[in-house]
Amino acid sequence: MKALVRLLGERKVLLGQAAQVYRYDAILFGQSPLAVVLPESTEDVVKLVRFAREARIPLVPRGAGSGLSGGAVPLEEAIVVAFTRMRRLEVDPVSKTAWAEAGVVTAEVTEAARAFGLFYPPDPASFRTSTIGGNLAENAGGPLCFKYGVTGDYVLALEFVDAEGEVHLLDRRAYDLAGLLIGSEGTLGLITRARLRLLPLPSGSQSLLAVFSDVEPLAQAVSEAIAKGAVPARMEFMDEACAQAVEAYLGLGLPPRPLLLVETDGEGAEEERDLLASVLEAHGARVQVARDEKEAEALWRARRAVSPALGRIRPKRVNEDLAVPRSRLAQVVEEIRALGEAFGLIVVQFGHIGDGNLHPNILFDPKVESEERVWELAHAIARVALKHGGVLSGEHGIGVLKRAFMEEAVDPETLEAFRRVKGGLDPWGGLNPGKVVP
């Protein structure tokens, strides 16, 4: 690695113990990297890729390490490419766009745009720490995705370095190779910056909390409200176990029942809120409408508290990420709950119910409970989604965690097409090997 240090300088290369923190993401540990490179420009990335290609050393791209599928974890001796120093951000209020380098923190885009009355809608739960590059790699979503869409819906152009060390600037108006890279988890190229679409800030918002006796009427109410034209900005579901965990953590007075949190925004927000409230109540819900911003903030504290609340129950968790038709949600939630009981493990469920995105979390203590059983349960949960016409991932990606499930989720012809695309864009096989495609 001395040659790498000479090429990029000591400041940009971490070796030995300093590199160990880059072995893991938010859920998985990997192999010790040979080195970690922190590029500060696209030119640095070009130099690194050409070095790695000549030396035949794999590259593992990484943002903030907040991923939940092992996509940024090295599986073999490799160089981790940590983009957190590529932080240039330029907002153009006239075109309502922003150029953001891969290491820009997601929340910083909206914070910079807010001065011009604009915002950047994609809002993954990790938006205060995750990076634009990581969001692009996973095509991340978030609570606003039902109304506003996911990361890929806001990319107008992107720049990437290919496996040969060549730079490409792709504009999506002509053709959509950029769309192929978004969500590819760094397996087809290293994204260095993107031109993002911004929207005007909504004029205002309204929030409500609905308490249901069971998941089935909750799912039916959501489907009916959407069928009647409701398109709320946020529509978040928590099952009984999740509500109990959050209540134990915050003491907000939440009942141990399935909960639905809804936010409407923009013109007509009050009318849409009232439509939702009437439909939810018709399905037996007890609805609490926030009277002002302070009460709305108190309601949404519950959703933001899910992660720390679950961390108090068990020291480790596997955060699954499924997307299923809304019409099958009640069945899916019940089957997953029954699986948790059968395996003797705690399973808590929540998610973005508007688009059927569900996050079953398996909570466990590795000192007491078998990790092998945990992964068996994770596989069984994935099969439930597939059985009901769903998919393996709504926003967290495939990475390592679900790579073994792909042969059940995707037909052989499609898998072969994936392999051909990978071979065409990464002929030497050095870009994030061992991820996504089995």
Image: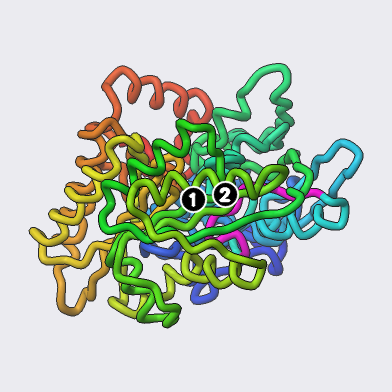
Answer with left or right where residue 430 lies relative to residue 6. Answer: left
Q: Position of residue 166 (x, y in %)?
A: 68, 33
Q: Is residue 363 visible?
A: yes
Find out whether the residues at labels 1 and 2 contact each other: C-beta distance under 8 Å. Answer: yes
Residue 277: numbered disc: 1
Is 182 placed left or right of 434 in the picture?
right
Q: Residue furthest right?
A: 94
Q: Residue at x 30, y 70 (%)?
A: 256
Total numbered circles: 2
| 278 left or right of 264 in image | left
The x and y percentages for residue 159 are 71, 37
Q: Quadrant of residue 179?
A: top right
Residue 48 seen by the camera? no
Q: Is residue 118 left or right of residue 24?
A: right
Residue at image coords 73%, 26%: 171
Residue 387 % position (x, y): 20, 34
Q: Front-most of 24 and 109?
A: 109
Task: Pick the residue in front: 258 or 1.
Answer: 258
**Identity of the residue drawn at 23% across and 71% down:** 364
Q: Main secondary structure of the magenta part?
A: loop
List the residue tagged with mark 2.
273
- Looking at the figure, which quarter contains the C terminus? top left
Vertical order, 279 against 406 (above or below): below
Rendered image quadrant of residue 314: bottom left
Of all residues shown, which one is farthest toward the left?
342
- The disc labelled 2 sits on which kind of residue? Arg
Inter-mark Cα distance, 1 to 2:
6 Å
Q: Which residues are magenta?
A: 118-128
- Local SS, label 1: helix
